[in-house]
Image (cartoon, rainbow, N blue to C red):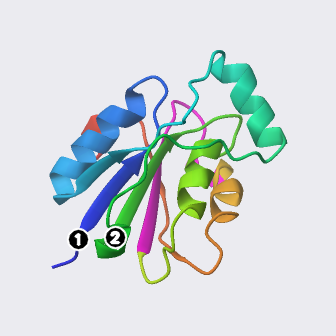
Amino acid sequence: MRKKLVAYFSASGVTKAAAECLAKAVGADLFEIKTQKEYSNVYTESNKEIRKNERPELADRVEQMESYDIIFVGYPVWWHATPTPVNTFLESYDLKGKLIIPFCTSGESDIDETMPTFLNSCEGLAVHEGKRIQGTGEV
């Protein structure tokens, strides 16, 4: 049986709700991607991070990442891109041999807008086509 992980970054709680629902539906462990330093102004700071291709330090790590076969990675769409904490997460582990499945939450933007910045952190990895989730009912 394949071991699954749902890792997610959520600023407002929308992505968290989708991740929790997904983890329950597929029988996966859950991991919240959190930055070491909280954002004081998420909109201006995230815009700067994305424009400068920065990688904020994360607060925690997944224990025994090597034991997971499938990793769902969830995030909100920020500035038509993947939030940089997600890139930090993806670049912090050896994920070769694992299936990466992205999902995003957004009211209007599609996941295709974020894929260039997501894939920048996935060189040589198996990445399945992602999906935008507008509500937990779509999980």
Residue 9 position, x and y percent, is 47, 40
80, 88: nearer the viewer:
88
Residue at position x 67%, y 49% from top?
Answer: 113
Classify residue 14 by image quadrant.
Answer: top left
Q: CA distance from mark 2 to mark 1?
A: 7 Å
Can residue 110 be found in the magenta stretch?
A: yes
What crowding class fits label 2: few (fewer than 14 Cα within 10 Å), some (14-19), or many (20 or more)? some
Residue 37 position, x and y percent, is 58, 29
The residue segment tinted magenta is 99-112
Task: Please state if 83 lies on the left or on the right of 69 as rendered.
Answer: right
Q: Which residue is mark 2?
A: 70
Q: In this view, which residue lies farthest toward the top?
A: 40
Task: Please state if 117 lies on the left or on the right of 24 as rendered.
Answer: right
The quarter of the picture where the N terminus appears is bottom left
Q: Amino acid at mark 1?
A: Lys
Classify residue 38 by image quadrant.
Answer: top right
Res 135 visible: no
Residue at position x 48%, y 59% from top?
Answer: 130
Q: Is residue 127 above or below residue 107?
A: below
Residues at badges 2 and 1 in contact (C-beta under 8 Å)?
A: yes
As drawn, the label of residue 3 is 1
Numbered label tally: 2
Residue 132 position, x and y percent, is 47, 46
Callout 2: SS? strand
Q: Amino acid at mark 2?
A: Ile
Res 102 visible: yes
